[in-house]
Amino acid sequence: MSELYCEEFDNGLGLKILDHSRRVAADRWLVRVEGRLAFSGGGDAAGEMRARFPEAEGEAWDRLLAGPLMRWIGERNFIDERDVDNVRGRLVDDFLSAARGYMADESFPARLVSRRLSEIGEQLAIERQLGEDPGEDDDGPADFSYLFR
């Protein structure tokens, strides 16, 4: 895994694009690039967002900050070895031309954090409804052997 691109935006977000390409057979490659958008280094942006959304519970914030805020994966399979660099460059260029403008926008972090906190809140509500460990009352598979006597 190597880093292809790294940029920190003025809005407190940082973008890294990583290369996960690998050979799959003879002269054929899986070209895979991953973009990760997260709060950049200092944590000031994360603190500002936490202040803007005080209603969000601590566990939701912990989950939000545990990984990237947003991931993008672009891949092309069974690429000729001679075309790997061109395909990789094209994937990165297409992603940057399509997404860089709105990721760098000042209002984007608040919209993204709001949406992600909403998703995580729904997920936490479902987990609470199901209980901590949905399999803890499970007695194993049902016995239907009486049907085959």
Image: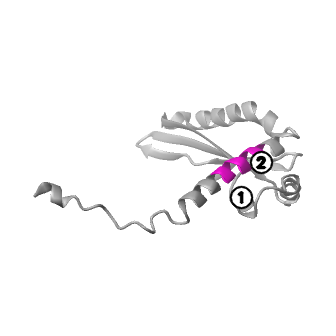
Q: Nearer the viewer, mark 1 or mark 2?
A: 1
Q: Is residue 117 covered in magenta?
A: yes
Q: Say which amino acid is labelled 1.
A: Ala
Expressed as whole percent of the image width and height from the top left, the position of residue 24 reads: 44, 45
Q: Residues within 10 Å of mark 1 (few under 14, many from 20)?
A: some
* SS for callout 2: helix
Q: Residue 136 lies in what quarter of the image?
A: bottom left
Q: Nearer the viewer, residue 34 or 60?
A: 60
In this rendering, the answer to whether 142 lies above or below 120 is below
Expressed as whole percent of the image width and height from the top left, the position of residue 95 reads: 69, 35
**Magenta portion: prevailing SS class:** helix
What residue sits 63% from the left and 55% below the top?
125
Gap between marks 1 and 2 measured at Cα: 11 Å
The answer to the question of whether label 1 and label 2 lie on touching residues, with beta carbons closer than 8 A, is no
User: Quick check: can you spot residue 36?
Assistant: no
* SS for callout 1: helix
User: Quick check: can you spot residue 45?
Assistant: yes
In this rendering, the answer to whether 96 lies above or below 34 is above
Tell me which segment is drawn in magenta: 112-122
What residue sits 88% from the left and 46% below the top?
11
The residue singled out by tag 1 in the image is 60
The circle drawn on residue 118 is none
The circle drawn on residue 113 is 2
